[in-house]
Amino acid sequence: MSALCLEFVILTGGRSGETMGARWGEIDLQAKLWVIPGRRMKGKREHRVPLQDRAVEILGMLEPLKTGPESFVFPGTKPGRPLSTMALAMLIRRLGIKQGEATVHGFRATFRTWVGDCTTFPREIAEEALAHQVGSEVERAYRRGDAIEKRRQLMSAWADYCAGASTVVALRTAG
């Protein structure tokens, strides 16, 4: 369960607490969408997360454990409780990664660095994918959408990168 949760965190760019607290009523497998209610978000505003194929596959593996819309997607060992907050940190340790070398939250930074350094996706799309507010108060007042389809493309490219399926094009140098 911990490994699937960590993979889901990485693929979605989500925070561990938001992911471990995910409930089936937030997930729309047909639309490939996870809608996190504002009350569960750090910024207190609803966040829609486009789900690419591997994230949907993970959810499909967990669906048999579903007992209703309020049941946790990543259930813990105690009935009616989510996965423990220490489960992902313990998994990282079991993988042989020393304390301080990597954190679960660090995968969000890895995602953001990858977007900025390795893609042409706009900064605003990357920040929206991480549920960060972008722009001035005035700009946010006029921006009504969340660029969900552009973020869907971004998250698909990220999943391909994580799976090692991204394409690197060699540039020829002059001379």
Image (cartoon, helix red, strand yellow):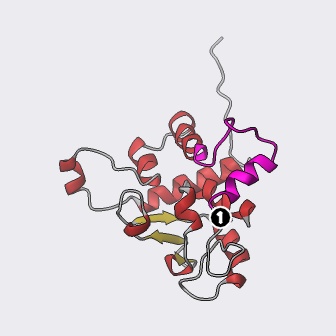
Residue drawn 57% across the image and 44% down it: 111
Q: Nearer the viewer, residue 82 or 37?
A: 82
In the figure, 140 relative to 34: above or below? above
Instruction: Tell me where residue 46 sits by quadrant.
Output: bottom left
Which residue is identified by label 1?
Answer: 84
- Asked if residue 24 lies left or right of residue 86, the reply is left
The percent position of residue 45, horizontal first and vertical second, equals: 35, 63
The percent position of residue 162, horizontal first and vertical second, equals: 69, 49
Q: Nearer the viewer, residue 92 or 84?
A: 84
Q: Which of 166 and 174 is in front in this view?
A: 166
Residue drawn 27% across the image and 61% down it: 144
> Over which residues does the magenta segment extend?
85-107
Q: Name the kind of residue labelled 1 in the image.
A: Ser
Instruction: Specify the farthest residue to the left.
Output: 138
Mark 1 Cα within 10 Å, few/some/many (few <14, many 20+)? some
Instruction: Specify the farthest residue to the front.
Output: 78
The percent position of residue 155, horizontal first and vertical second, equals: 56, 55
Instruction: Tell me where residue 91 sits by quadrant.
Output: bottom right
Residue drawn 73% across the image and 53% down it: 90
Quarter the C terminus occupies: top right
- Asked if residue 23 lies left or right of residue 79, the reply is left
Instruction: Tell me where residue 123 sits by quadrant.
Output: top left
Instruction: Specify the farthest residue to the top.
Output: 175
Residue drawn 38% across the image and 67% down it: 38
